[in-house]
Image (cartoon, coloured by chain):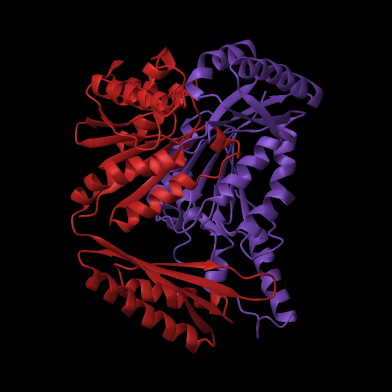
Chain colours: A red, B purple
């Protein structure tokens, strides 16, 4: 059974269009490649009530993991843990393990000459102030630890918004957890480009291919400029073994190509892999 | 009063990480520049129940406009209007005005020699099949019209996922509506880069500047690689006039720069505009 994951991205910069949400894209791709199933992404601003209410809604839906990104830093504006604590009705307290991690970081900054003297100011202690029962996840490239929480049957993980830190904590601490939960599932995808046919001409035949290949997800992406019809078809599946995944996609692809060529279209393979 | 807008992005390609959500980013930036307030973005897969349930949740929140993107095309997989019809409990019927738009498109394709003969197949009629009471919005660069619906006090707008079509319908039909609703509001933003200081050192002072400038949104984005501390500060506001907006940001910026320099940091202006 594939595990279901929801992402919550916290950051007003995403809602004013200042920042392109490359974090969600990276994480969605990474989770999919591990055989996980990202079922929804929600983007909210740096606001405690918005964070809390989006988490509550997410917890009512069917999913195994909820991963938040952003809002773990030292500033006033970093409100993710406050929002989560509110939604879970847990107190925020200084977590000893997290405090050690943050202290060790600042001590290393002093040793490296990046800071003049060691001092645990309140914005620094803030990064070690976690909802009760939470476990900090080491941050190899920055100061704010990631945070792991369990609530009933769900696992909630909070990662920083700085891309390098988000990725490092994911690879170091979250990936092993997801791999264990996902088991031996594997994802396989391929893309082809079809030219010389219109999407609406192919639609009924594509529906038939989808119907004949229920485990393969087929999606057409029209790419045509005004005078050229170009459609990208993306085929993907998640299966217990890479052989099964590969065979499923190959079968569906062969059927699809036959149809496109019958309609007078031309095909180019653009990407295959997992 | 700023108008509140939620975006719902429909597309499994966004949840498997195949496609970066540049549509949401473009639209968020565009709406913000018009003085509108994007309060949440939700990304769901091509699934009728997911589309319907996310729309229902969105309609229960406080917002004036809900804009969906994606899932209006001719294929089996384009399910947005079916999901919306379900959520609003409205029937899907062929809309005469939409049918004329779609027919005119395919007739023009025949005239231009892009299609051999005119034929309104069922996938083509599908693009003109809208929830009852909906109004089609002309699509200058593609076939599927945009869709405008009113429900109680909310306006629901559906745009295609193909970026050029989404943008063209937005600029032609949606922008005038939002401008009218937003009134004379204007957005102004500026960014500076501070080097030589740490985010946690500046945090309390930045909080004071935010407190002193309640209408200015200030956010710090740490950009530092391992050995260099670089923080981007982004200041923005929405106001009744561009003068007011500009002055608000300038005042906050002056206070912020003074603090950064007091702490030994260096400043570079990176971007100013609206």
Place of residue A239 in the rendered image (x, y in percent of width and height, measured from the top left): 24, 64
Task: Write the residue at 59% across / 68% down.
Answer: A223
Q: Is residue B191 visible?
A: yes
Task: Write the residue at 64% across / 18% down.
Answer: B261
Considering only vertical position in the picture, is A170 above or below A227? above
Q: Front-most of B119 and A236? A: A236
Considering only vertical position in the picture, is B19 above or below B61? below
Specify whether A46 is left or right of B265: left
Which quadrant is the C terminus of chain A positioned in?
Answer: bottom left
Specify whether A260 is left or right of A37: right
Specify whether B19 is left or right of A34: right
Q: Front-most of A125 and B141? A: A125
Q: Front-most of B170 and B215? A: B215
Count of numbered labels shown in the rendering = 0
Which quadrant is the N terminus of chain A positioned in?
Answer: bottom left
Residue A141 location, quadrant: top left
Task: Write the residue at 36% across / 53% down.
Answer: A30
Task: Write the residue at 70% across / 76% down.
Answer: B109
Place of residue A97 in the rendered image (x, y in percent of width and height, measured from the top left): 24, 23
Q: Tell which residue pokes out farthest to the right in this image.
A: B243
Residue A224 location, quadrant: bottom right
Place of residue B237 in the rendered image (x, y in percent of width and height, measured from the top left): 67, 25
Q: Front-most of B161 and B204? A: B204
Place of residue A203 in the rendered image (x, y in percent of width and height, measured from the top left): 48, 73
Considering only vertical position in the picture, is B138 above or below A218? above
Q: Is residue A62 visible?
A: no
């Amino acid at each position: 059974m594939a595990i279901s994951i929801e992402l919550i991205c916290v950051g007003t910069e995403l809602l004013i269009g200042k920042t392109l949400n490359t974090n969600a894209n990276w994480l969605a791709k990474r989770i999919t490649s591990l055989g996980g199933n990202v079922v929804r992404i929600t983007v909210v601003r740096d606001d405690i009530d918005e964070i809390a209410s989006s988490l509550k809604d997410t917890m009512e839906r069917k999913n195994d993991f909820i991963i938040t990104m952003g809002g773990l830093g030292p500033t006033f504006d970093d409100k993710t843990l406050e929002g989560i604590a509110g939604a879970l009705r847990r107190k925020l307290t200084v977590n000893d393990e997290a405090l050690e991690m943050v202290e060790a970081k600042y001590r290393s900054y002093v040793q490296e000459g990046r800071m003049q003297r060691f001092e645990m100011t309140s914005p620094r202690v803030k990064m070690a102030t976690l909802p009760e029962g939470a476990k900090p996840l080491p941050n190899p490239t920055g100061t704010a630890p990631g945070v792991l929480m369990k609530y009933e049957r769900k696992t909630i993980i909070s990662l920083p918004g700085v891309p390098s830190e988000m990725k490092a904590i994911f690879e170091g601490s979250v990936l092993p957890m997801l791999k264990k939960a996902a088991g031996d599932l594997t994802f396989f995808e391929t893309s082809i480009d079809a030219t010389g046919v219109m999407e609406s001409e192919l639609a009924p035949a594509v529906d038939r291919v989808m119907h004949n290949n229920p485990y393969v997800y087929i999606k057409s992406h029209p790419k045509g400029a005004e005078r050229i019809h170009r459609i990208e078809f993306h085929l993907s599946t998640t299966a217990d073994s890479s052989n099964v995944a590969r065979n499923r996609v190959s079968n569906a692809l062969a059927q699809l190509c036959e149809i496109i060529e019958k309609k007078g279209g031309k095909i180019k393979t653009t990407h295959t892999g997992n």
